[in-house]
Image (tube, rainbow, N blue to C red):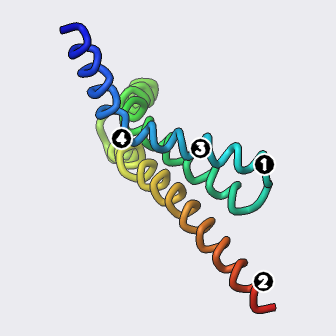
Amino acid sequence: MTTDSLLNTVYLTFAHNEYAIAFFLGTIISFFLLLYKPSRYATLLLIGFSTLLIGFEYQKHIMEPLQNQTLESLESDGGASTLTLVRIFQKLLPFGFFTIGWGSIFSSIFLREFLKVRTSTD
């Protein structure tokens, strides 16, 4: 019975954090790739996976407390400025993390393939 509960705990932990684990592994692999052979490709991969990991953690754990803390410190009255801040915290920052993260990863792949084709034709 103890083994089943331990396996269930491991499974639920993985299921809860699967994207974070994947982004973390991508960050670690791209970091070591950057140490082994520095290149724009590895740098963009590191930026992309790091940004996606930060974005995931932001949405999951940081967004709500940071938003509440900022609104309390401004002692807002619920006007238009409050709505703008809420939209920034809930929409703009997650969109920015997503766009920069995946954009960096796709740019690194495109850059690597583009340079490979360009150098083979020269």
Label 1 with label 4: CB-CB less than 8 Å: no
Residue located farthest toward the bottom when viewing the structure as drawn = 121
Relative to residue 110, is residue 1 depicted above or below? above
For marks 3 and 4 on the same chain, the one whose residue lies earlier in the sequence: 3
Label 4's element?
helix
Depth check, front residue: 28 or 51: 28
The amino acid on which the numbered mark 4 sits, given as a three-letter code, is Thr
For mark 1, what is the residue? 36
For mark 2, what is the residue? 119
Residue 75 appears in the picture as rendered: no
For marks 1 and 4 on the same chain, the one whose residue lies earlier in the sequence: 1
**The image quarter in which residue 16 lies:** top left
Disc 1 residue crowd, few under 14, some 14–19, many 20+, Cα 10 Å:
few
Q: Residue at x 42, y 49 (%)?
A: 94
What separation in Å lies between label 1 and label 4 (alpha carbons)? Answer: 47 Å
What separation in Å lies between label 1 and label 3 (alpha carbons)? Answer: 14 Å
Residue located farthest toward the top when viewing the structure as drawn = 2
Number of numbered discs: 4
For marks 2 and 1 on the same chain, the one whose residue lies earlier in the sequence: 1
Label 2 with label 4: CB-CB less than 8 Å: no
The amino acid on which the numbered mark 1 sits, given as a three-letter code, is Tyr
Disc 2 residue crowd, few under 14, some 14–19, many 20+, Cα 10 Å:
few
For marks 2 and 4 on the same chain, the one whose residue lies earlier in the sequence: 4
Label 2's element?
helix
For mark 4, what is the residue? 82
| Foreground tag (1 vs 3) | 1
